[in-house]
Amino acid sequence: MARAAIILAAGQGTRMKSATPKVMHRIAGLAMLGHVIAAAKGAGVNRIVVVTSADGEAVREFAAGTGARCVIQDKQLGTGHAAACAKDALAGFSGEVITAYGDMPLVTAATFEASFAARAKAGMAVVAFRSRSKAYGRVIARNGILERIVEYKDAGENERAIDLCNAGIMAADAKSFFRWASKLENNNAQREYYLTDVPLLAKGEGVACAVVEADEAEMMGVNSRAELGQAEAAMQKRLRAAALDAGVGMIAPETVFLAYDTKLEADVSIAPYVIFGPGVKVAAGAEIRSFSHLEGADVGRDAIVGPYARLRPGAVIGEGAVIGNFVEVKNTVVEAGAKASHLTYLGDARVGEGANIGAGTITCNYDGFDKHFTDIGAGAFIGSNSALVAPVKVGDGAFVGAGSVVTTDVEPDALAVARAPRKVIGGWAEKFRAKKRTEKGK
Ligand code: UD1
Ligand code: MG
């Protein structure tokens, strides 16, 4: 059966106190909304509608990039009203639909799958989890079948004491869902159209709603900065566990921060305090040492990175290459076995196989307007504290003398030395000191 998802993301998220829309705040380097969309796709959903507010331009741009359709909810009249806004976008769709909130980044494809499965049996399904937090609506159920959901603000003493909470995921037949959603009313504490009242309308037509229980660690809704931090911690735990399980070595996993898409092969070893931004791949046998920051980088087999290295987007580190302390690499291919062991900036460059980059080498890639390319040949040796002013090419096997400023190409196997000639004045220091002593009377 065809599967669609409606993801609600039009709320202001006022509790975040941020100019950034709530669902665009990131968890492990990806907007919360992105996590929910990925989980839906993982459950075989191929039509996704994201409900946004009129000023949610950033949300729409992001959602469109994932292939989702966006609709606008002009006024935030409640979750039920928001879901109903997806009706036109799903006109003519016949199949099952799932609703979810854009602020539940820990949700998994398995939970969406379970709710579709429960819906197929019972008629409708909602997902619940155990919590005592005041943030959640309470689920009143009997023998696994829903009686009703009551928002905490609308609940009486006894209902508030119930620890079964509404996650915000609902599965239903699409056509029936929109029929029910259009009949919602707003006679409640918040004067809102509650999505949570849909099962009552279903019940009125004799359609039962199953309650699927999921783990709290997966269901938390993020409403504040503090909760964003908690969700990040939970996601990091999950990502670290998966990496360890896949054979990645980490002696202090709690200090390693991974991105949602970090790809680490078995036998990669990561020292304490390493941060991965999005888009990093590390091949087997590579070692990432402490206090390194990687983003958009590809690290080859048995390479060594760090300690204190920074790999920026487009850094490609070849097999067995070494990127040492205080080395920054951006948009640069460092070929197999090449070494930049200390204090270097390599930007918009190629470093040929086996080349050696001395400490303090800088590729001067930017003239204030454009970026230029530096090409360093295989086996070249760049002496310490050299400035390579791009565009420039150092041929295979060439040497650049320490302290050189290289502005023109160096022939293969040549030596280029570009520094002021040494001038020596014998005995100058002693004369200088004598003069100073006389002046000061010492
Ligand atoms: C909601 C549920 C509550 C549940 C909790 C789980 C309702 C009535 N309440 O409460 O039972 O326990 O989530 O986290 O559904 N949104 C819109 N348009 C609106 C209102 C909200 O798009 O008019 C979106 C928000 O952007 C958000 C989601 O819907 O992504 C949930 O809204 P939120 O205000 O966070 O609802 P809660 O009070 O957390
Ligand atoms: Mg919420």
Image (cartoon, rainbow, N blue to C red):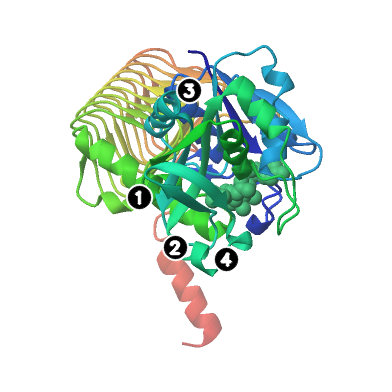
Q: Residue at x 42, y 59 (%)?
A: 163
User: Could you say which disc has been placed on residue 291 in the image?
Assistant: 1
Whether 322 is drawn above or below 292: the answer is: above
Quarter holding residue 203: top right
Q: Is mark 3 within 8 Å of ligand 1?
A: no
Q: Amino acid at mark 1?
A: Phe
Quarter holding residue 410: top left
Cα–Cα span, label 3 and label 4: 38 Å
Label 1, residues with CA under 10 Å away: few <14, some 14-19, many ≥20: some
Quarter holding residue 293: top left
Task: Indicate the secondary structure of the residue bearing disc 1.
Answer: loop
Q: Is mark 4 within 8 Å of ligand 1?
A: no
User: Could you say which disc has been placed on residue 41 in the image?
Assistant: 3
Seen in the image, is 213 located left or right of residue 103? Answer: left
Q: Do residues under tags 2 and 1 come within 8 Å of each other at their CB atoms?
A: no
Which residue is more in the foreground, 394 or 427?
394
Cα–Cα span, label 4 and label 1: 52 Å
- Closer to the camera: disc 2 or disc 1? 2
Which residue is more in the foreground, 108 or 240?
108
**Residue at image mark 4:** 156
Seen in the image, is 300 located left or right of residue 148? Answer: left
Label 4, residues with CA under 10 Å away: few <14, some 14-19, many ≥20: few
Q: Do residues under tags 4 and 2 come within 8 Å of each other at their CB atoms?
A: no
Q: Amino acid at mark 3?
A: Lys
